Image (cartoon, rainbow, N blue to C red):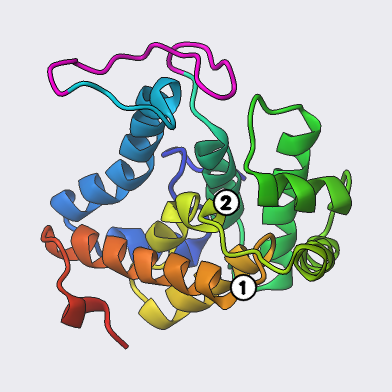
Amino acid sequence: MAGEHGFASVSSSREARGAGLDEGQRDRAIAVVLTSALGDALGAGYEFSSVPPDLVPDMIGGGLGDFAPGEWTDDTAQAVAIARAAAEYDLRTEAGLDAVAGGFAQWYADGPADIGIQTRAVLAAAGAGASAATMRAAAQAVHDRTGRSAGNGALMRTGPVAVAYLDDPEALVAAALAVARLTHVEADAGESSALWCLMIRHTVLTGEYPAFDDVAA
């Protein structure tokens, strides 16, 4: 059942976690998702190009996917699927990962304007209604065929994982690795996602940018 705060978690355990945040922490947690989506939509029209220093960026649309002005890219679309799954499930469980995989598969079936090469190959191979197991198998097959899968696609969508596990850094790392593994086999992809989530967590909870020692295991 959907919660009244959109991306906020809806299970009793997750509501209890959110209740422990002060106003500033809640604002920063919400901003993880909203500002990422806004920045993604703002930058979509400038991807792989240079913006002159005297130009004020605008929601111009266009870009690789011929996006409409204000439309976000594949990164946010996948982040939304993760956030929706996290609102209902523990992302470390197979049920939670099935929900993420199903969200990815449905989004892909709807014909996104643009999508990264690695993720496109995996989702095409996994097919409609893919489970987490099917998607992991497809990711492994793509990796075995190409010999690489350490692109940044898993990292770019991982923000909601951090928000879902602000109270538990060990669970955060496990969830980030599991979600990344759905499409990206190489350890670098999962570990960079986990590190980024730990950095987000530190900033949400403290209001400060993390130093190395704040996130180092």
In the shown orientation, is residue 209 left or right of residue 179? left
**What count of labels does the image hold?**
2
For disc 2, the neighbor class at 10 Å (few under 14, some 14 to 19, many from 20) is many
Residue 171 makes an appearance in the image: yes
Q: Which residue is mark 2?
A: 82
The secondary element bearing badge 2 is classed as: helix
Residue at image x 32%, y 47%?
32
Identified at 55% across, 73% down, the residue is 177
Categorize mark 1 by other alpha carbons within 10 Å: few (<14), some (14-19), many (20+).
some
Q: State the residue in front, 17 or 68.
A: 68
**Range of residues picked out in magenta:** 53-70
Q: Position of residue 128 (x, y in %)?
A: 88, 43
The structure residue drawn at horizontal position 61% and vertical position 71%, both measured from the top left corner, is 178
* Labelled disc at residue 113: none
Q: Quadrant of the C terminus?
A: bottom left
Q: Position of residue 122 (x, y in %)?
A: 77, 53
- Residue 213 is left or right of residue 148, and the answer is left
The residue at the point 52 percent across, 78 percent down is: 174
- In front: label 1 or label 2: 1
The front one of 79 and 18 is: 79
Height in image: 59 above or below 110? Answer: above
Residue ID for mark 1: 186
The answer to whether residue 68 is magenta is: yes
Location of residue 110 (image quadrant): top right
